[in-house]
Image (cartoon, rainbow, N blue to C red):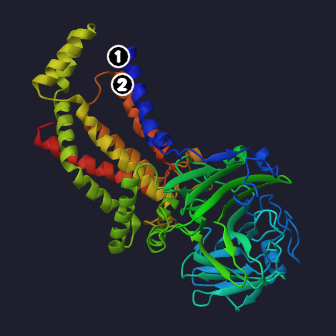
């Protein structure tokens, strides 16, 4: 029986392995410090000195600070049971038509509040509903974007509001035909809003004011996204879902529960963007990248309903009598496709728009691995095969280091008879035993720690591939072969119902599929090739590791388990060849 100290060290090694596998990014993937914060109580008190005041020098806060948008004529007020289709039918609308988006623009408020994604469905079933992104005000899960102007402090200038009914010029909004809305305030100001869309998910919003009066007018442009209700999130610490944005090149992430505590967070920057993200879907406001924007993340509860808002207020614009002013911004609403976000970052000059995808702390590895998978997939047409081929490439890149490690491990295995003799001879004298062991290692030019090198090398790649499979929409609903129809989801089979032969649905912790079992088997075989601990208690503990990792990784994405199993097979082959060459049985 080994000493308690040795057993403790083994258990400690197991615990550290689990921490490395599950918790690395918990420590390294933290958001930067938040900006200026205001409590929920302060945010609810209009006129509080911590909030922007309406003065000649400081712009008023964006409309909607009280979070109460009047109901449009003919549209019912907030109703928890209101159906989305009924709300859409209740008001005047202009349809949105493109190959990738379906929906409509509400003429009341000129809001973008009805949008679904034609390319994406809720499940793998071909008749599954399309992903609904935006929903009109009046529903408990309302989610919409609004644009407009706010007047200078103390001015009685009438500006279009949430209940303003605009006049549309155009029958539909398409990539070929922009939609222009107009409204006359009856005081000499004519407001125009032109909405354009590309063939993907980006809208361009151009707001123009013509002053036909005889006095100059001061206005501030604003844009906002509001979401009613707290959505169900994955709840996994390696993925951010909530409010976030880039300010002066730095990403700031705010979780829903954090904003509930803080009430309001303010930031000021030149350019950048702000938005609300789900795992795969994004809405984002992109102001003019060369002007100052005062941004806020805000939360409030009304009638038991959480309401979240991101908004920004643009720079002051003085519209001279007989003159006009114009401001242009962008609004993204769609899927977080990597190449598409990168293209907007380049074509529109949006600061770090690629960070809309949570690449994690291993950004420098995660993104290249993603592009490598996409490149290989372009030739083989299967992301599962791409993972296998990429693993081969990674093994080849680290072959010299891994080869040196496996040689050292083979030497250790060859020295096991000598080590057993030393243990039998000096078992009671730990100090002398350690001295003799070190002398043996030095004499045979063997480093016992070098066998850990393959695992150390594999950890960053493991996490990077995990990120790719977990957060990129390109991996969503991508099949491999057989029963693996979604590489981003866990293996759907379970040994506890004989892989579907028995009509029984095991609980999640017993969903141990075929691929996790195969991964555990390869881990067991690889362990058998390694030098075995001379102590029987340690040997039993290490024998338990493949079982533990089988349960641990069973609920991970199937693509990651396939990678791990395939990597183990390649390592077994490499190690077996080296051991044969060195004459190790």
User: Which residue is the site of mark 2?
Assistant: 538
Q: Nearer the viewer, residue 98 or 263?
A: 263
Q: In the picture shown, does residue 340 fall above or below 37? A: below
Q: Position of residue 261 (x, y in %)?
A: 71, 43
* Mark 2 neighbour density, 10 Å: few (under 14) some (14–19) many (20 or more): many
Q: Measuring 60% from the left and 77% from the top, which residue is drawn there?
A: 203
Indicate left or right for 90 with 226 as reference: right
Q: Nearer the viewer, residue 566 or 109?
A: 109
Dots 1, 2 in contact, CB < 8 A: yes
Indicate left or right for 28 with 69 as reference: left
Numbered circle sitting on residue 100: none
Q: Measuring 57% from the left and 84% from the top, which residue is drawn there?
A: 99
Numbered circle sitting on residue 2: 1
Q: Quadrant of residue 433?
A: top left
Residue 242 visible in image: no
* Mark 1 neighbour density, 10 Å: few (under 14) some (14–19) many (20 or more): few
Sequence order check, earlier mark of 1 and 2 = 1
Q: Position of residue 399 (x, y in %)?
A: 21, 50
Q: Position of residue 159 (x, y in %)?
A: 79, 74
Q: Measuring 54% from the left and 63% from the top, which residue is drawn there?
A: 271
Q: Nearer the viewer, residue 58 or 303?
A: 58
Q: Mark 1 falls on what kind of element? A: loop
In the rendered image, the quadrant that contains the C terminus is top left
Q: Position of residue 177 (x, y in %)?
A: 61, 90
Between the C-alphas of marks 1 and 2, the distance is 8 Å
């Amino acid at each position: 029986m080994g000493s308690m100290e040795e057993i403790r060290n083994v258990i400690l090694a197991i615990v550290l392995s689990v921490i490395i596998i599950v918790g690395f990014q918990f420590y390294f993937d933290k958001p930067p410090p938040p900006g200026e914060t205001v409590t929920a109580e302060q945010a609810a008190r209009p006129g509080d000195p911590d909030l922007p005041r309406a003065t000649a020098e400081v712009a008023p806060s964006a409309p909607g600070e009280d979070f109460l948008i009047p109901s449009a004529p003919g549209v019912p007020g907030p109703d928890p049971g209101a159906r989305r289709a009924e709300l859409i039918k209740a008001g005047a609308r202009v349809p949105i038509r493109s190959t990738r988006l379906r929906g409509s623009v509400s003429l009341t408020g000129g809001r973008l509040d009805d949008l679904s994604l034609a390319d994406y469905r809720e499940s793998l079933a071909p008749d599954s509903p399309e992903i609904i992104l935006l929903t009109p005000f009046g529903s408990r899960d309302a989610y919409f974007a609004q644009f407009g102007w706010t007047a200078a402090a103390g001015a009685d200038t009438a500006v279009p509001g949430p209940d303003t009914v605009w006049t549309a010029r155009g029958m539909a909004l398409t990539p070929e035909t922009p939609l222009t809305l107009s409204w006359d305030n009856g005081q000499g100001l004519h407001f125009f809003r032109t909405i354009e869309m590309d063939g993907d998910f980006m809208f361009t919003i151009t707001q123009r004011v013509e002053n036909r009066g005889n006095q100059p007018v001061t206005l501030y442009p604003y844009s906002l996204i509001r979401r009613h209700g707290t959505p169900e999130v994955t709840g996994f610490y390696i993925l951010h879902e909530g409010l976030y944005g880039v300010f002066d090149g730095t990403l700031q992430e705010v979780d829903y529960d954090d904003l509930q505590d803080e009430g309001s967070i303010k930031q000021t920057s030149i350019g950048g963007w702000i938005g609300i993200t789900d795992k795969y879907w994004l809405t984002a406001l992109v102001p003019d990248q060369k002007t100052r924007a005062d941004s806020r993340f805000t939360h409030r509860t009304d009638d038991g309903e959480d309401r979240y808002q991101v908004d920004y207020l643009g720079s002051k614009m003085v519209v001279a009598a007989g003159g006009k002013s114009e401001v242009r911004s962008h609004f993204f609403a769609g899927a977080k496709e990597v190449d598409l976000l990168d293209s907007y970052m380049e074509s529109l000059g949006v600061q770090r728009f690629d960070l809309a995808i949570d690449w994690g702390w291993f950004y420098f590895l995660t993104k290249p691995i993603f592009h490598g998978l996409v490149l290989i997939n372009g030739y083989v047409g299967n992301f599962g095969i791409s993972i296998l081929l990429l693993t081969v490439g990674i093994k080849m890149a680290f072959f010299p280091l891994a080869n040196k490690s496996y040689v050292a491990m083979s030497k250790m295995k060859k020295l096991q008879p000598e080590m057993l003799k030393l243990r039998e001879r000096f078992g009671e004298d730990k100090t002398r035993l350690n001295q003799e062991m070190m002398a043996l290692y030095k004499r045979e030019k063997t480093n016992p720690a070098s066998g850990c090198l393959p695992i150390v090398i594999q950890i960053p790649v493991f996490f990077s591939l995990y990120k790719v499979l977990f957060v990129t929409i390109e991996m969503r609903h991508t099949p491999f072969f057989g029963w693996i129809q979604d590489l981003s989801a866990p293996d759907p089979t379970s040994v506890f119902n004989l892989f579907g032969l028995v009509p029984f649905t095991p609980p999640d912790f017993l969903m141990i599929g075929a691929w996790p079992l195969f991964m555990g088997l390869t881990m067991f075989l690889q362990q058998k090739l390694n030098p075995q601990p001379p102590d029987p208690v340690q040997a039993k503990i290490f024998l338990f590791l493949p079982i533990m990792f089988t349960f641990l990784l069973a609920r991970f994405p199937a693509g990651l388990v396939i990678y791990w199993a395939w990597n183990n097979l390649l390592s077994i082959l490499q190690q077996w060849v080296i051991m044969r060459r060195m004459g190790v049985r």
